[in-house]
Image: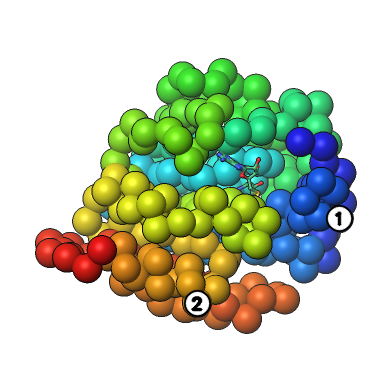
């Protein structure tokens, strides 16, 4: 998939994909969007000390990088599984300014996120182990159970097949109790699909340029029957 590097309003890069006329992140600020939706409202809301993360759409590695930094800060052990169907060329990933924006001394780890082998569990730091899976998430089975899901596919308008009840059910069935799913999408039909699956869903105030986003939690001891 061809993509072009562009600057977003908070100075961080994103990629624009002409083929589908869509960016990987909000043009109002890629870094700000990831920090609020995935780190502050997802990772930092997880109370466990060992967190198993599933990312749907590894892309630029921004969410993985911010999670690695936060895992170090908070001394939490993270096992990070990320699916990606169209991996970025390493040369393209090296042009992204995320280390400079956030933690220049950690550039080595950002590069490692991209150069690490696919399909292998790779310990990158004492707190962060990575498993990247180069496969179509829609047809893949999930290799583990998760405490935290970063649902970061392209939008439902551009990729409706990623936002179905079946996909959410597959995720729900591989979630531990109290697992959290966050996503930038707030559309009514997506919220209802998540609810129908069994998640408790709330809308939270969004980053610049976006009024709200969704956080969903798998209830403990749920005896959910509506399907
Ligand atoms: C909105 S971008 C976000 C990527 C990433 N989270 C980031 O911060 O850069 C969506 C990502 O999902 C990937 N993707 C699209 N369809 C997929 C599929 N069927 N299975 C796995 N990944 C997919 C795209 O290639 C892209 O990297």
Q: Residue at x 17, y 65 (%)?
A: 224
Identify the mark at residue 108; answer none if there is no mark. Answer: none
Q: Position of residue 133 (x, y in %)?
A: 50, 28
Front residue of this view, candidates 4 and 104: 4
Identify the mark at residue 7; answer none if there is no mark. Answer: 1
Tell me the element at label 2: helix
Mark 2 — residue? 188
- Label 2: how many Cα within 10 Å (few below 14, some 14–19, many 20+): few
Specify the quadrant of the image occupied by residue 202.
bottom left
Front residue of this view, candidates 12 and 84: 84
Front residue of this view, candidates 114 and 22: 22
Q: Residue at x 50, y 77 (%)?
A: 188
Which of the marked residues, 1 or 2, is nearer the chain's N terminus? 1
Specify the quadrant of the image occupied by residue 105.
top right
Asked if ligand 1 lies within 8 A of label 2, the reply is no
Q: Quadrant of the N terminus?
A: top right
Q: Is residue 7 above or below residue 145?
A: below
Q: Position of residue 23 (x, y in %)?
A: 76, 54
Q: Is residue 174 above or below residue 221?
A: above
* Image quadrant, ligand 1: top right
- Label 1: how many Cα within 10 Å (few below 14, some 14–19, many 20+): some
Specify the quadrant of the image occupied by residue 219.
bottom left
Whether residue 128 appears in this view of the structure is: no
Q: Residue at x 37, y 33 (%)?
A: 141
Tell me the element at label 1: strand
Q: Position of residue 19 (x, y in %)?
A: 81, 46
Q: Residue at x 25, y 63 (%)?
A: 227
Whether residue 64 appears in this view of the structure is: yes
Front residue of this view, candidates 188 and 74: 188
Q: Is residue 31 above or below residue 93?
A: below
């Amino acid at each position: 998939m061809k993509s072009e590097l562009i600057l977003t309003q908070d100075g961080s890069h994103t990629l624009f994909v002409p083929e589908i006329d869509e960016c990987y992140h909000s043009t109002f600020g890629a870094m700000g969007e990831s920090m609020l939706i995935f780190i502050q409202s997802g990772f930092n809301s997880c109370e466990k000390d060992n967190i198993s993360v599933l990312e749907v759409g590894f892309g630029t590695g921004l969410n993985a990088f911010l999670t690695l930094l936060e895992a170090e800060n908070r001394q939490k052990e993270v096992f990070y599984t990320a699916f990606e169907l169209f991996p970025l060329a390493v040369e393209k990933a090296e042009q992204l300014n995320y280390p400079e924006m956030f933690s220049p001394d950690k550039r080595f780890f950002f590069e490692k996120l991209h150069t690490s082998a696919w399909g292998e569990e790779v310990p990158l730091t004492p707190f962060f182990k990575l498993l990247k899976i180069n496969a179509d998430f829609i047809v893949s089975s999930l290799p583990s159970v998760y405490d935290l899901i970063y649902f970061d596919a392209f939008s439902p308008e551009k990729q409706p097949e990623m936002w179905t009840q079946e996909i959410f059910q597959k995720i729900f069935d591989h979630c531990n109790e109290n697992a959290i799913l966050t996503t930038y999408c707030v559309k009514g039909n997506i919220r209802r699909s998540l609810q129908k699956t069994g998640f408790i869903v709330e809308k939270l105030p969004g980053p610049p340029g976006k009024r709200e986003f969704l956080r969903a939690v798998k209830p403990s001891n749920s005896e959910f029957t509506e399907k």
